[in-house]
Image: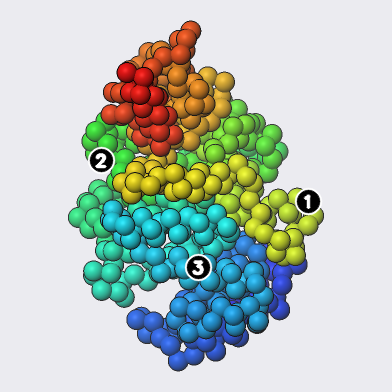
Amino acid sequence: MEEEYKKLVTKIKHYNPNPNLELVSKAWEFAKLAHYGQERLSGDPTISHPLAVTHILADWKLDSISIASGLLHDTIEDCGIKKEELVDEFGEDVANLVDGVTDISKLKLRGSKDEEFVDNLRKMLLVMAKDLRVVFVRLADRLHNMRTLEFLSEEKQKRIARETLEVFAPLAERLGIGEVKSELEDLAFPYVYPDEYKKVSELSKPQYKKAEDHIKKMKRVLHKKLGIQGIRAKIHSRKKHLYSLWRKLERSEINWDFEKIQDIVALRILVETVENCYTALGIVHNTYKPVPQIAISDFISQPKPNGYRSIHTKVFGPGDRIVEVQIATFEMYEENEYGLASHWYYSLMKSGKASDKVVERGFFAPTEKINWVKQLVDWQKKEADSDEFIRAVKFDALAERIFVFSPKGDVFDLPINASPVDYAFAVHTDLGAYIKAAKVNGKMIPLSYKLKSSDVVEIIKSKEKRKPSHDWLEFVVTTEARREIEKHLRKEGLKS
């Protein structure tokens, strides 16, 4: 264990020039003593779990308060330590974080619609709104527990895995931690859907191999051409994760036809500057013919609402196989993988103030990237009805996301199955009162049309305000659209 702790310290020093190692060391000694003699079901000493959790937090480049809290996160729940003891030893910030993690660890989010679930979900959202670091420690805790899930009973495995798919993986996505979201899904997949997992695992192996062979040829060619232009680049392939692949194969328009999945293995190009990203895009398009009628998704000039930045394009690779190419800077890649967890680090490094003293004043996160957390808290205050709150969280806030564009290129984050009506209310609540018709990618479509990622959506406005149709409630999925439509219909009901 001591060797692993030394590796942790080395890892922290690598990204944080001014860590509070005295605090971290004190937390390590305290946690070892608190967990002394305890063992996990695997037979490993219990202290191995908080140490593993803290390694994950260090991978996300979090501050020393988060690191210390990771080491101590089970001491209240498992060791009988009082919060007041942690305040005396480590101060209010660490004690509040550990207490917050303890509180949400007790909440069982089983996916049922009973009052207990709703109440627990509300409590978790309130904790999140106070300090997002609580959620990062909880996510790291869940990630390590999922990696060691085989030691639990079958009943617990299924419950924890389903909860992970329903709550924690979507939560990781909303926080912009893409790699964590994917790993959580893949770890839960075989426990929740064992037959489907086995099927997609076996059928995908030759498809991955075939795609990788095509990518290898492209990597060699593009490395050479980027080098000629003096661009230092790292090019690697990104395999589509199994759970995500299964979800895509299940779509009616795909129907298990692997040839229709163009990103089973994508090509990722990492460069040093934003200018190099666009130069690399030109080189890719000059080397491999872009796929017609598939627009470039430029999430650098217009980042996704969760902070994701990259350029996506599709080209005809060797053998005329369609390949997705993603282009980003090294810094963007780090932020895309670790999302808001790493945001404070990069922002403070740029300002030359990367120290824990700055972070101790409160977890830094840009307001626009955590608006959805505040929106959730707002919903939980307004939605007295449990079923409505469940709908708001499961089918809107924590649903799988798509990203669509306005005609001007603005990016909008919507839940899967969103319609042009949902889009209109997302742009502005007032726009929903002027919906006459809608276009997607320049073509007229019904208002019930299910939008897909990268669609360009245009609302054809009427000259005067129109009454929302009651039929819209049959297909809208966002809480905002549903609330506004119902509000207008209630007004009409009062008038009649």
Q: How is the image coloured?
A: rainbow
Mark 3 and mark 2 lie on one chain; the one further toward the N terminus is 3
Mark 1 and mark 3 lie on one chain; the one further toward the N terminus is 3
- Mark 1 highlights which residue? 351
| CA distance separating discs 1 and 2 | 46 Å
Considering only vertical position in the picture, is 179 above or below 383?
below
On the question of residue 234 being in view, the answer is no
Amino acid type of the residue that numbered disc 1 sits on in the rendered structure: Ser
Residue 450, position in %: x, y?
Answer: 34, 28
Q: Could you tell me which secondary element the residue under label 2 belongs to?
A: loop
| CA distance separating discs 1 and 3 | 30 Å
Mark 1 and mark 2 lie on one chain; the one further toward the N terminus is 2
Contact flag, marks 3 and 2 (Cβ < 8 Å): no
Amino acid type of the residue that numbered disc 2 sits on in the rendered structure: Glu
- Mark 2 highlights which residue? 250
Amino acid type of the residue that numbered disc 3 sits on in the rendered structure: Val
- What residue lies at 48% left-to-right and 84% top-to-bottom? 80
Residue 480, position in %: x, y?
Answer: 44, 34
Describe residue 250's horizontal placement relative to residue 182 as left or right.
left
Q: Which labelled disc corresponds to residue 101?
A: 3
Describe residue 100's horizontal placement relative to residue 111 as left or right.
right
Residue 314, position in %: x, y?
Answer: 46, 30
Q: Which labelled disc corresponds to residue 392?
A: none
- What residue lies at 60% left-to-right and 27% top-to-bottom? 282
